[in-house]
Image (cartoon, grey):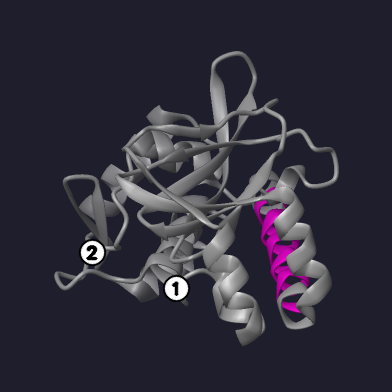
């Protein structure tokens, strides 16, 4: 019960209310949990698996705003408008936890520590969004790929074999950094040839961390 962001930060006395109000459900790989434009009826947390939070970009493209895993909250971007401005899709089979909006709002009013932690999360989320926008405007694609791999390594950690613990397609990586599939495909091949990364079955391993970090500070990357 202490695996999600909400459960970790509420009063012990509130955990009985959480148990009574939570709804856990299984999601399949590529299953859409909610879509851009849907009414907001509640808030979600990831109990297992990985979820991508994404937004339409033009007619047939999307941009991935963030990934949610390890108990992280998602669906909060529609709290003010009561309409989701984004979509959420499962990247793999997993379990998500859902709370009705009324109970979530009651939790905010009763649990000061949770409300504070959530505010700090929003601050970090905003900072990361601003950094992504700055990188999109000023950093070459190779640098953005390197920055993304460093971020993914930090968020998801490593498997026993050293690969980043998320199975990510080239298209999803392209959508995350705001580049075309063809450009990301070329950049990954360059990183492979330079022996900076290794790839196996949509998993990526960073072989030379120092060179990867250097790409994020190199204007000619």
Other-residue count near label 2 (Cα within 10 Å), few / some / many at <14 / 14–19 / ≥20? many
* Residue 170 location (% of width, % of height): 35, 38
Q: CA distance from mark 1 to mark 2?
A: 28 Å
Which label belongs to residue 198? none
Q: What residue sits 33% from the left and 45% below the top?
A: 168
Q: Secondary structure at mark 2?
A: loop
For the N terminus, give its image quadrant.
bottom left
Which label belongs to residue 1? 1
Which label belongs to residue 163? 2
The reply to whether dot 1 and dot 2 touch (C-beta < 8 Å) is no
Tell which of 174 and 112 is nearer to you.
112
Query: Picture quarter containing residue 11?
Result: bottom right
Q: Identify the main secondary structure in magenta.
A: helix
Q: Residue furthest top?
A: 59
Q: What residue sits 49% from the left and 44% below the top?
A: 52
Q: Is residue 21 visible?
A: yes
Q: Secondary structure at mark 1?
A: loop
């Amino acid at each position: 019960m202490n695996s999600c962001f909400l459960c970790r930060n509420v009063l012990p006395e509130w955990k009985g209310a959480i148990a009574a109000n939570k709804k856990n459900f299984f999601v399949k790989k590529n299953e859409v949990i909610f879509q851009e434009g849907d009414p907001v009826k509640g808030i979600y947390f990831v109990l297992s698996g990985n979820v991508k939070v994404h937004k339409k970009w033009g007619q047939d493209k999307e941009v991935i705003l963030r990934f949610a895993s390890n108990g992280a909250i998602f669906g909060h971007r529609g709290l003010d408008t009561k309409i989701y401005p984004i979509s959420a899709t499962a990247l793999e089979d997993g379990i998500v936890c859902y709370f009705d909006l009324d109970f979530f709002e009651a939790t905010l009013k009763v649990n000061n520590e949770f409300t504070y932690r959530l505010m700090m999360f929003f601050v970090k989320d905003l900072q990361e969004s601003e950094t992504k926008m700055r990188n999109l405007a000023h950093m070459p694609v190779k640098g953005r790929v390197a920055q993304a791999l460093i971020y993914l390594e930090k968020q998801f950690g490593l498997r026993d074999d050293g690969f980043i613990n998320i199975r990510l397609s080239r298209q999803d990586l392209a959508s995350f950094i705001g580049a075309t599939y063809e450009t990301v495909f070329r950049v990954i091949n360059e990183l492979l040839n330079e022996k900076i990364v290794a790839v196996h079955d949509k998993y990526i391993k960073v072989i030379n961390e120092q060179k990867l970090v250097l790409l994020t500070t190199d204007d000619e990357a």
